[in-house]
Image (cartoon, helix red, strand yellow):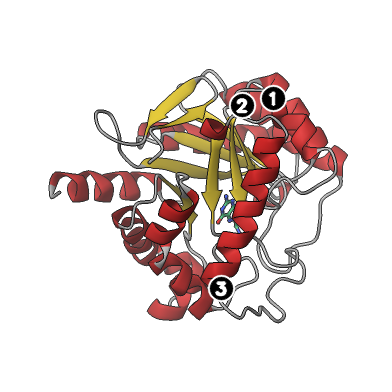
């Protein structure tokens, strides 16, 4: 079993002393959170949201400029850079590790210059130039599985054996990345809940968390916060999915997940502390 995850300025033990699940807080930097859509106001809002997450005990802040929710359209490169870069520079010395949620090689390069600790790529570093952009840094790389793309992925998700197919995809990406010279200790995997998957596919993958970790020998990041897979079993709309999401995060950690990506940081941190004390 893997012993550490190299995470930029940080090094996370995965077993023994100091090993615990890490909480990644979601920081969406989208101008629609504001009436005037102003650049300055959205920066202020992002910083104050980040401060709340730090107060709540967040380990990693995941900064994203482009929505990847089902049906979301792509965002032009310049717009993504304009949204994300000021936030990365403002947050990099605030304590937590910083991740950037992007599939664009040019954003990866700029983010590495800004000093981020992780590149979180929903596209699994498949864009031309992505491997070259991240290879010579020390940041962690999260390789996520997605069928199709955000605009089309929920139209007709289809698998013969979803767990086997996700494992095969991740195996292939891991091999390509290692062959390009990337240290395997920088890699982690993500089954990509909600990315071209039905509710049944998502829960089959959640139940298979331990198998993904064991077969690929990689730490796993689980992101299911407020997603439709939580809504499907609770019957709740997106704004009332906090408790269901905390339950899902605990289930993922109980199955061995190393990192959980969440909206509700303080609630997840507390739930994990109690769960850990009961171990
Ligand atoms: C994720 C993730 C992500 N999810 C990683 N990055 C999103 N590594 C963005 C729904 O079904 O799981 N892992 N970056 C958000 N994407 C979605 C997808 C949001 C599906 C909502 C749904 O509701």
Q: Callout 1: helix, strand or loop? A: helix
Measured as percent of width and height from the top left, residue 86 is found at: 70, 27
Q: Quadrant of ligand 1?
A: bottom right
From this viewpoint, which residue is outermost toward the left? 278
**Does any portion of residue 262 appear in the rendered image?**
no
Q: Residue at x 20, y 51 (%)?
A: 275
Mark closest to the chain's N terminus, 3 or 1: 1
Give the tally of numbered discs.
Answer: 3
Picture coordinates of residue 42, whole percent (x, y) = 67, 39
Graded by Cα atoms within 10 Å as few (under 14), some (14 to 19) or many (20 or more), the crowding at tag 3 reads some
Q: Quadrant of residue 276?
A: top left
Q: Nearer the viewer, residue 14 or 21?
A: 14
Residue drawn at (50%, 68%) of the image: 238
Q: Is residue 106 above or below residue 162?
A: above
Assign a secondary structure to mark 3.
helix
Which residue is labeled 2 in the image? 116
52 or 254, which is in the foreground?
254
Q: Earlier in the sequence, mark 2 or mark 3?
A: 2
Check whether the beta carbons of the residues at disc 2 and disc 1 lie within 8 A of each other: yes
**C-alpha span from label 2 to label 3:** 32 Å
Say which residue label 3 marks. Answer: 162
Element at label 2:
loop
Which residue in the protein does label 1 denote? 112
């Amino acid at each position: 079993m893997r012993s550490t995850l190299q995470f930029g300025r940080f090094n996370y033990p995965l077993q023994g002393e100091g090993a615990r699940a890490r909480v990644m807080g979601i920081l969406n930097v989208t101008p629609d959170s504001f009436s005037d859509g102003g650049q300055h106001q959205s920066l202020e809002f992002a910083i104050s949201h980040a401060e709340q997450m730090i107060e709540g005990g967040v380990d990693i802040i995941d900064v994203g400029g482009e929505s990847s929710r089902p049906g979301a359209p792509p965002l032009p490169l310049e717009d993504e850079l304009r949204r994300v870069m000021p936030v990365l520079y403002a947050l990099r010395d605030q304590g937590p590790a910083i991740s950037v949620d992007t599939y664009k090689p040019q954003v990866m390069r700029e983010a590495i210059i800004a000093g981020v600790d992780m590149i979180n790529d929903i596209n699994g570093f498949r864009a031309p130039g992505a491997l070259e952009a991240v290879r010579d840094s020390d940041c962690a790389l999260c390789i996520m599985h997605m069928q199709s793309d955000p605009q089309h992925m929920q139209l007709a998700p289809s698998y013969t054996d979803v767990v086997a197919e996700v494992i095969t995809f991740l195996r292939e990406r891991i091999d390509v990345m290692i062959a390009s010279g990337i240290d395997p200790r920088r890699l982690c995997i993500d089954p990509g809940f909600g990315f071209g998957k039905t509710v049944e596919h998502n829960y089959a993958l959640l139940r298979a968390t331990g198998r993904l970790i064991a077969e690929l020998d990689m730490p796993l990041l689980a992101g299911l916060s407020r997603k439709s897979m939580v809504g499907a079993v609770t019957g709740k709309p997106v704004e009332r999915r906090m408790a269901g999401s905390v339950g899902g995060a605990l289930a993922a950690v109980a199955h061995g997940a190393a990192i959980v990506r969440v909206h509700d940081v303080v609630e997840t941190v507390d739930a994990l502390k109690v769960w850990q004390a009961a171990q």
